Image (cartoon, rainbow, N blue to C red):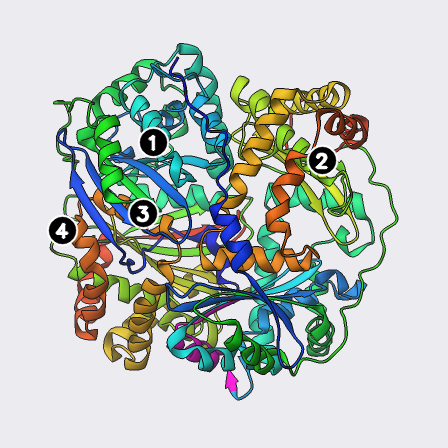
Amino acid sequence: MMRMVILGALLWAGAVQAETSVKTLTSPGGLSAWVLEEPAIPFTALNIMFSGGAALDPPDKRGAAFLMTGLLEEGAADLDSQAFAAAKEALSASFSFDVSDDTLSISVRVLTENRAEALALLKTALMQPRFDPDAIERVRQQVLSILASNAQDPTDIAQRVWAEQAFGDHAYGTSYQGTESSVAALTRADLLAAHQNLLVRDALSISAVGDITAEELGPILDDLLGDLPAGSALEPAPLERDIPAGLTVVDIPTPQSVAIFGHSGIDRAHPDFFAAFILNTILGGQGIESRLTAEVREKRGLTYGISTVLISKDRANVMLGQVASANDRIGAAIEVIRDEWRKLARDGVTAEELQAAQTYLTGAYPLRFDGNSQIARILVGMQRQGLGLDYIKTRNAKINAVTLPEINRVAAQLLKPEALNFVVAGQPIGLKEE
Amino acid sequence: MFNRLFAILSLCVPLEALAQGPITDFMLDNGMQVVVIEDHRAPVVVHMVWYKVGSADEPSGKSGIAHFLEHLMFKKTANLDAGELADTVAANGGSHNAFTNHDYTGYYQRVAADRLELMMQMEADRMTGLQLSPDDIVVERNVVIEERNQRTESAPGSLFNEDLQAALFLNHPYGVPVIGWMHELEELNFDDAMTFYKQHYAPNNAVLVVAGDVTPEVTKTLAEQYYGVLPANPSVTPRARRQEPPHRSARRVIFRDERVAQPFFARSYLAPERNTGDQGRAAALVYLAEILGGSSATSVLGQALQYDTQQAIYTSAQYRSTALDPSTFSLVAVPAPEVDLQQIETAIEATIANFMTHGIDRELFERIKSQFRASEIYAMDNVSGIAQRYGAALTQGLTVADVQAWPQILQEVTPEEVMAQAERLFDESASVTGWMMGPKEQAQ
């Protein structure tokens, strides 16, 4: 055996540099933002995130926020869809609009040489989208095509049924992309309403990283976003419902079944969150070889990939996993998953596992701060989660502070083998519905 | 707007213009090529070893062995237990993975810059020290079978794409899928893996790319210490694959599957690739793909079919410029409801014919040219991406000088050259036309 020297010292330079160099600012007009000046490359990455997303769709208008977001670039002010695209391409700028159940986010890259023109164009998309009838129809057809493809996709089917069973009539129980009938029925007025509801000033988080100074950024933000209507985002409906346990098979013709499985999770702000986060890393996370990867893939060759994740939404927390195995092997994979869930809930993790996960997570954290676009994404996400700038400095200490008794107490509380709900899309052999 | 959501329909990924940075390259005495790309913004390094061997170099009947071996490279070696490399990378907070395509196989780790030596120690160890056991074969073959199930058997679009490629290439192994045909994959064994490994994994068949917060001096010292001591393998020979005969027949692939929700049209042509010292034709084809199908709102196909006639809900033109041997140029379209595949095919042909008559809109051309220039600036933000471009180029017949010349070559392309390449490209007898559809649609 070669002795691989594992250095204990954690490399901090990256994160510390980001932490000490990120400035918070309030623009003359009163907008707050975080900025990291990095003049080496002549462009700026700007991230704008609104709290409040597709979960604010009225119940019969599911998909409104998604379709609206898809139309922001399809014509604005005096430019129609094609003229807007040509203008953006001439400036070599990129604007990417994304909506999820809880947020609407805009990732922007603009060159220093034409930053003012590019941001003026972006402003028209945010403030004066046209929602032209022909553009609505064209993008609606794209969405319907995506929905039709999703309806045949085993992973998408299993995820959709799992969410339906878990969240029922709540917006989280259906896809933010909408359904065939809801999307077909959306009107221009619905899109205008979604635009008005979501793009509001007090819901904003903003970050900028790149060839820009804090002094420059303030007035730029006032120009870009100062005209947004005041007010905060609406709150999504509360969700009071237990996730049912069981096993459902959705029969679709495919040689390989996809299983989605999980139960309730834990809030990002809960004092046990870091213990749960490490626990998930050990059970089914990425980065280190998880127990599920070791048992299902490496020892038995039952799958190409298996993973679990903690999802913290505004109104729900879940611990969710995914695996795909041939129809005659998915039953065996599910048995192993149940066993591992039971074992971990009952016996907890070992001191070695805890330490390996802590070492990995704390070592990987500073490596995230690499690249303007990537850092801008991290900074806007931190603001949205209500984390202070000092989180960059304190986060690893929180990981390292988790003790063995603590994580094993959390394992016993969080992991509930009897509460697991499995949804299997495919033609599994020998699986009994529960 | 939603083009990125159609990524699953992509037939190939076009490379954009390449970014420039402080680049140093040198050769070790045993023939291993080294490229160092400096980016000192963050204390991170990407360490990659690329082998000049891919699925197109597999023996007949052994499809999938290059990719299967890539999986097996994480098993026991002379100095590492199975999984130890992965565990060690994780213990240092890093990430790692591997990839295989028709022309290359690559392994990488992304770690804190001061862990570079450890990565080289492990990567050099498995270059020649793999110690497989028969048990490894059985379990990992099942993993790869599940990978094929997941990526291909469960995705009708992938099955369709395999059949298109197989029909396009009459003789060249680019017609065989990288992951392998299922019936051959199921039979791959220990000897197949070890024979392939011993023939192709050697310093004189590898390219080391180190990118990030490193200096050429330190990289050279470490590379000589770990890789430089491995002997060159005399069995490594230049690659000479079976090439295509003249294409005389336009071919058609009619693919039906009950899981197809959205019918889909594709036409692929054989196209020249970037060659060392001769990248002009490929550069013109990169423009042609952008002009015809780059942006939905402003490209020729997008304007004609998604805006003017609204017969399509998605169109694209895709060209793979970097490959060792002649490559592919493809036109694809997803028809609108009520439009059948024959109608979309006719409309695409008419649009291309009209383009060939009327030529290129100068404003569109200039916008694309300035976007290629800007993409070099944006690319500098991602040093891993730049490392990948060098690795891919150097394992596909290009040199460091070719990579560095490429952005300027792109800036010098003229509309006349693009039209001349379009004339040569659109030869129906060198094409395959594919219709992917559900069981009920009429093929006509």
Say if B183 sits above or below A164 in the image: above
- Label 1 or label 2, whichever lies nearer to me, is 1
Tell me where residue A341 appears, x and y as whole percent. Answer: 72, 24
Residue position for label 4: B276
Tell me where residue A139 appears, x and y as whole percent. Answer: 57, 69
Give the residue type that dot 2 points to.
Answer: Ala
Secondary structure of residue under mark 2: helix
Tell me where residue B275 appears, x and y as whole percent. Answer: 15, 51
Residue position for label 3: B387
Secondary structure of residue under mark 4: loop
Give the residue type that dot 3 points to.
Answer: Ala
Q: Distance between the residues labelled 2 and 4?
A: 53 Å
Crowd around label 1: few <14 · some 14–19 · many ≥20 (10 Å) = some
Q: Which of marks 3 and 1 is nearer the N terminus?
A: 1
Check contact, mark 3 vs mark 4: CB within 8 A: no
Residue position for label 2: A276
Q: Are marks 2 and 3 on the same chain?
A: no
Q: Give the range drawn in magenta.
A: A79-96
Q: Earlier in the sequence, mark 3 or mark 4?
A: 4
Corner quadrant of residue B427: bottom left
